[in-house]
Image (spheres, rainbow, N blue to C red):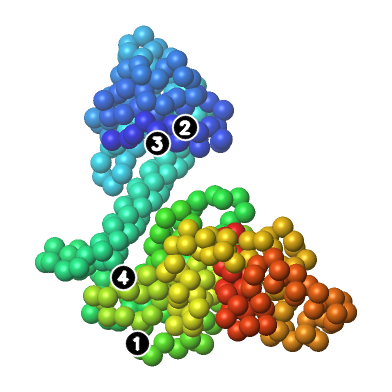
Amino acid sequence: MLQVNFAKKIVNEVRKLLNEEIVVMNTAGTIIASTNNERIGTFHEGALITSKKNEKLIIKKEDESLLEGVKAGINLPICFGKQVVGVIGITGEPIKVLPYAELLKKMTELLIQENFYKEEMTRQTRTLEAFIFDWLELREWDLAFYNRAELLNINLSVPRLLILIKVIREDQQLFDLSMKWRSERNRNDLCINWGNDRLLLLLEADPPLDHYSLKNKLYRWKNEIETSNHLSLQFGVGTIVQPTELKKSFLKAERALHAITGHNWIMFDDHLTLEMIMEDLRLDTKKEFIQRTISPLLEDEELLQTLRVLFERNFSIKKTAEALHIHINTLHYRIKKIEDHTSLNPKKTKDQFTLYLGLYILDHYTK
């Protein structure tokens, strides 16, 4: 049986093509959508007859006094498969609206079919998302879990690589990108939406990980999606694990995604070094570290920039002065000011590392 909201959608689509009054009825004969709002909720005897007989009904002007709630026009059964699910009617002189009748019926049934498959696809997608969520969280697999995997045609015996993808859109619109992954690929690959701005990509992969080939594969797909959807993607790549250890790859992919900075679009977890430690620190710990180290420099952008360039030039005084277009004596003066403000001597290894760590946290984790 037709739902009210979908019946309204049918009316809105059909009225783009026809100026005549359109009504949509359920199989009980009640008008559930119409271009004339006053008729919604009223009984239409012609629709009841059409539904029971499963055939077109022409209503003449004289029939208006014989059948309850009808107007001259044509009623047509709406079928899904062999079942009548509703009735659609065109109000008007039968001879004038007759040419539109079969076209209207076909268009309506196509809309119903499209909506059904869309809902079915959504249901399957949600079922897959729920299964992968359980896959990540379950410590032990029971018979029900194996049965669900079999119904979804998911192979639980092959090694897996998990990749988290951040979807960045300027307009912040949410939409389903999971169907965009085209396996080049491998029928065991899976892709689902993961929250509002993430995709989770689950690939079949044999160790050792071929970083170069995977990066090229993802880059091709990235360009294809970004070009056609006006967005940008960032990829955090976990490590190859056995299917029972999928959560480990997920956590590493998440860590890698968080570590992406600047113009980079991909990060492999097994390429992380300092980021491994940083990701495990609580945000309040990071903020407190900044307070204890470089916070006195936060109001002096010139000193902060000088410190950044010093590290970029591996603490070469000459190269740093050249990059900043200042005299070496001016640079020494700024280094002394950094020491005075922070009580950390940039020329001592421990203090230098402390300053670097404070600046690193400031630039990567507090913005």
| Quadrant where the N terminus is found in the figure | top left
Q: CA gap, disc 3 to disc 4?
A: 40 Å
Say what secondary structure mark 2 lies in.
helix
- Density class for disc 3 (Cα within 10 Å; few <14, some 14-19, many ≥20) is some
Say what secondary structure mark 1 lies in.
loop
Q: Which residue is mark 3?
A: 6
Nearer the camera: disc 1 or disc 2: 1
Does label 1 or label 2 sit earlier along the sequence?
2
Does label 2 or label 4 sit earlier along the sequence?
2
Q: Amino acid at mark 2?
A: Val
Residue 46 vs 327, above or below: the answer is above
x and y percentages locating residue 274 in the rendered image: 50, 78
x and y percentages locating residue 212 in the rendered image: 51, 87
Q: CA gap, disc 3 to disc 1?
A: 47 Å
Nearer the camera: disc 2 or disc 4: 4
Nearer the camera: disc 3 or disc 1: 1
Say what secondary structure mark 4 lies in.
helix
- Density class for disc 4 (Cα within 10 Å; few <14, some 14-19, many ≥20) is some
Does label 2 or label 3 sit earlier along the sequence?
3
Q: CA gap, disc 1 to disc 4?
A: 17 Å
Residue 141 vs 159, above or below: the answer is above
Q: Which residue is mark 4?
A: 247
| Quadrant where the C terminus is found in the figure | bottom right
- Density class for disc 2 (Cα within 10 Å; few <14, some 14-19, many ≥20) is some
Q: How many numbered tags mark residues here?
A: 4
Residue, x 32% and y 25% (percent of image)?
47
